[in-house]
Amino acid sequence: MEDRPDELAEEVARPVTRRQVLKQFAGGLLALALPAAAVLAQGPLTFNTGVDDSGAVLDNYAVDAHFTLFASADPRFPGPDTVVVDNTLFPIATGNWIASSPTSKWIAPQGDQDYLIDANNGNALGDYTYRTTFDLTGYEPELVRLVGQWTVDSAGIDILINGASTGSSISTNLPVSGEWWHPFFVSTGFVQGTNTLDFIVERVPWGNSTYLPTGLRAEFIITNLPPPQLRILAASPLVLVWWPTNTPAFALETSARFGTNENWSLFRGPITVVSDQNVVVAAPSGPSMFLRLRRR
């Protein structure tokens, strides 16, 4: 007896896990999904501003080895060192900047930003670019996501991933932007190997001062999303196979035999896009075959 549509709707489409084979019809279609490469469970190593290799916060005036001053508007402090700002002074201890925490501290071209004590403290007006790097070797770049928060004095111009704008900014219209955290999210622009992340900060004019407080505070993590799953459902007299459309780096491959060393080739049949899924409709007749998703 044929399955009714309402019965088919109640079937559970189970995800295909590594090396798991779902047999849908005797002598018919077999399907499996093998990850294209090892996808690490944890994200790559990253560092907040003002911390050492273990993630512990650095002392005041210490050089932050994980961030470089890639561009500076102050000829007195051209970089490449970035320095942890003294949090016992203005503008942290008695000013408007967010207080230091066990997870991060402010960094700047120089450690003393208290221009109220000495007019030579702080830094010149203009743009400063703070750069950090992280390694995505062994990761699938299109599956990587970067989530974080930043705060600056006095304007956040942009965050760049490998030189490309992410559209993240902090307005100068805020009374003091360094009083609050500002979230950011990056989902594209990553590459295999070394990636650069640039935070562009502008010190805008205030009164007649030549030098004013400026700095960066950033906290972020990188996550690696799981690889796409190939799913299968028996919908008599057909078999449906589908996977998400938002992973264009993965292609559907087929083989007459199971095994990583077998002769896999690109699936040449029709693939229909339904909503956010790629869908293959196959008949259970004919020889058995295996399917997998593999990074192109």
Image: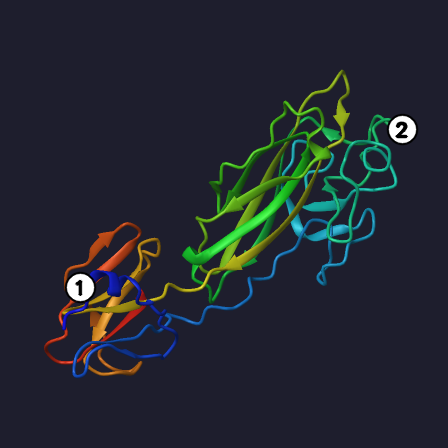
Whether residue 74 appears in this view of the structure is no
Where residue 154 sits in the image (x, y, percent)?
Answer: 68, 29
Answer with left or right where residue 227 lies relative to residue 210: left
Residue at the far top: name it.
Answer: 208
Q: Nearer the viewer, mark 2 or mark 1?
A: 1
Asked whether disc 2 touches disc 1, contact meaning CB atoms under 8 Å apart, the reply is no
Dividing the picture into quarters, in which one does residue 117 lie? top right
Residue at (47%, 60%) from the top-left corner? Answer: 225
Dividing the picture into quarters, in which one does residue 176 lie? top right
- Please tell me which residue lies in front, 83 or 250: 250
Residue at (25%, 61%) from the top-left corner? Answer: 6
Residue at (46%, 52%) from the top-left corner? Answer: 190
Q: Quadrant of the C terminus?
A: bottom left
Where residue 129 sits in the image (x, y, percent)?
Answer: 61, 39
Question: Mark 1 highlights which residue?
Answer: 281
Residue type for callout 2? Ile
Question: Mark 2 highlights which residue?
Answer: 117
- Please tell me which residue lies in front, 60 or 177: 177
Up the image or down, 103 lies above or below 209; here it is below
